[in-house]
Image (cartoon, rainbow, N blue to C red):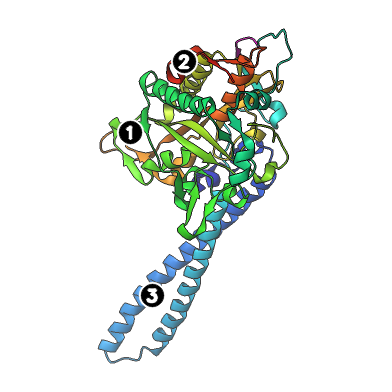
């Protein structure tokens, strides 16, 4: 959420930053916030003046009555003043409500080093590994998995509909092995505290991280109306809200959490896209990294967090590239994002397996997460960061397609063998 004071003091700078996202409606929203802010301040000034007048008149009425003098003219004035104060208070509630709603819908201004444009303007920052050469035609993961008997899409469709995969045998063990290994890596080598969050959240939690109202109104959330709860779209939501409405002590930062959760997304706006196999599903597993940082080092922390996600891909031996997202491709709450894309030879394309984002103080303002820079100093908003470390479906796709052999078996990455109990997946 943006600070109204910043919008008031630097309107042109805010408009310029938001223009990098390429969304025309944000400029109009800023203009409306400014108009409402001006009206609010005028109403507050008028209301304060009238309340001061009411207090003075009240004292004068009392003085006249004690002196036996007529005060009807002052009583009539007080009635008029009271009516106007009620009108002002009612309008203030309307103005403040509209302002709050607008601020909830304005995205985070991108960082100054984020390029303008849409997805086509994303910049490749670095690459790692070389795509494997095959002396046979590499197959897509859905064919490999079907022959191995480790993925049962029809069973998932039978019980829940398309986009809800069922993993069988070694496929289920591969999921479990990846989750356990990634959590162990991030907790033991990268210093994150492992947490196990709820898999449902309330609206306040979605609001705090920026998924409400847009994510919900776009139809992408799975809602449980009778309980006022939503299935988590990512562990980022509950974990970031662990510290909602808190003031953290100076020695608490930085804080880093690693969490596993299933993730639920209706993907209402993506019907018909990437529907084969595991490329786009409504339920998937993900290991998430969340950090709370002092503002002055949040960009450095973003590089660290991205490096931690990259370490997963390097240890798995999967070729990948790192993209700096352009403004038009940024998530709503992010000021700067790196996407990690892994090479999948069977579908002959790069697949996103992680987004690592610095949200600066955008989420912290919405969620009321502050810290004291030093004992006795005024609290400031923390900077929040998050990243997938990693999302499983496309990671599994890459493991199957990069590790496939001519006989249909799949070589298991060495780091997973102690967790999976085998070095090769066979039918």
Res 301 → quadrant? top left
Residue 146 position in % (x across, y down): 64, 27
Q: Nearer the viewer, mark 1 or mark 2?
A: 2
Q: Nearer the viewer, mark 3 or mark 1?
A: 1
The residue at the point 52 percent across, 30 percent down is: 357
Going from N to C along the chain, the mark reached first, 3 or 2, is 3
Q: Which residues are magenta?
A: 127-131
Real-space Cα separation, disc 3 to disc 2, in angstroms? 79 Å
Q: Is residue 108 visible?
A: yes
Question: Quick one: 343 or 281, which is closer to the camera?
Answer: 281
Identify the mark at residue 417; answer none if there is no mark.
2
- Disc 3 marks which residue? 54
Real-space Cα separation, disc 1 to disc 2, in angstroms? 45 Å
How many numbered circles does the render carry?
3
The quadrant in which the C terminus is found is top right
Residue 290 position in % (x across, y down): 44, 32
- Disc 1 marks which residue? 373
Instruction: Tell whether label 1 touches label 3 (CB within 8 Å).
Output: no
Going from N to C along the chain, the mark reached first, 1 or 2, is 1
Secondary structure type for disc 1? loop
Question: Quick one: 290 or 69, which is closer to the camera?
Answer: 290
Main SS type for the magenta part? Answer: loop
Res 101 → quadrant? bottom right
Residue 23 position in % (x across, y down): 68, 42
Question: Quick one: 408 or 234, which is closer to the camera?
Answer: 408
191 on left or right of 66: right
């Amino acid at each position: 959420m943006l600070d109204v004071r910043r919008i008031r003091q630097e309107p042109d700078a805010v408009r310029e930053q938001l223009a990098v996202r390429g969304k025309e409606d944000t400029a109009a929203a800023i203009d409306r916030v400014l108009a409402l802010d001006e009206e609010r301040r005028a109403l507050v000034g008028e209301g304060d003046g009238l309340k001061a007048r009411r207090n003075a008149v009240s004292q004068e009425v009392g003085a006249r009555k004690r002196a036996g003098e007529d005060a009807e003219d002052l009583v009539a004035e007080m009635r008029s003043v009271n009516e106007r104060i009620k009108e002002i208070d009612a309008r203030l509630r309307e103005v403040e409500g509209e302002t709050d709603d607008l601020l909830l819908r304005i995205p985070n201004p991108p960082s100054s080093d984020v390029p303008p444009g849409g997805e086509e303007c994303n910049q490749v920052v670095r690459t790692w590994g070389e795509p494997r050469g095959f002396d046979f035609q590499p197959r897509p993961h859905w064919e490999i998995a079907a022959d191995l008997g480790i993925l049962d899409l029809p069973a998932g469709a039978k019980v829940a509909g398309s986009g809800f995969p069922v993993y069988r045998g070694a496929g289920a063990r591969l999921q479990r092995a990846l989750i356990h290994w990634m959590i162990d890596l991030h907790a033991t080598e990268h210093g994150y505290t492992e947490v196990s969050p709820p898999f449902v959240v309330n609206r306040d939690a979605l609001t705090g991280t920026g998924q409400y109202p847009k994510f919900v109104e776009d139809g992408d959330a799975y809602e449980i109306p009778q309980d006022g709860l939503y299935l988590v779209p990512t562990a980022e939501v509950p974990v970031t809200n662990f510290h909602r409405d808190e003031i953290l002590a100076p020695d608490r930062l930085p804080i880093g959490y690693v969490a596993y959760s299933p993730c639920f997304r209706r993907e209402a706006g993506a019907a018909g896209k990437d529907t084969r196999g595991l490329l786009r599903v409504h339920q998937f597993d993900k290991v998430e990294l969340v950090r709370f940082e002092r503002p002055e080092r949040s960009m450095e922390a973003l590089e660290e967090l991205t490096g931690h996600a990259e370490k997963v891909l390097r240890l798995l031996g999967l070729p990948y590239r790192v993209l700096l997202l352009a403004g038009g491709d940024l998530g709503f709450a992010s000021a700067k994002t790196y996407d990690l894309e892994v090479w999948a030879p069977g579908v002959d394309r790069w697949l996103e397996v992680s987004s690592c984002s610095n949200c600066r103080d955008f989420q912290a303002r919405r969620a009321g997460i502050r810290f004291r820079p030093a004992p006795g100093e005024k609290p400031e908003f923390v900077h929040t960061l998050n990243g997938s470390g990693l999302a499983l479906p496309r990671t599994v796709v890459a493991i199957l397609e990069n590790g496939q052999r001519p006989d249909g078996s799949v070589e298991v990455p060495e780091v997973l063998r102690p967790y999976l109990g085998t070095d090769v997946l066979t039918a």
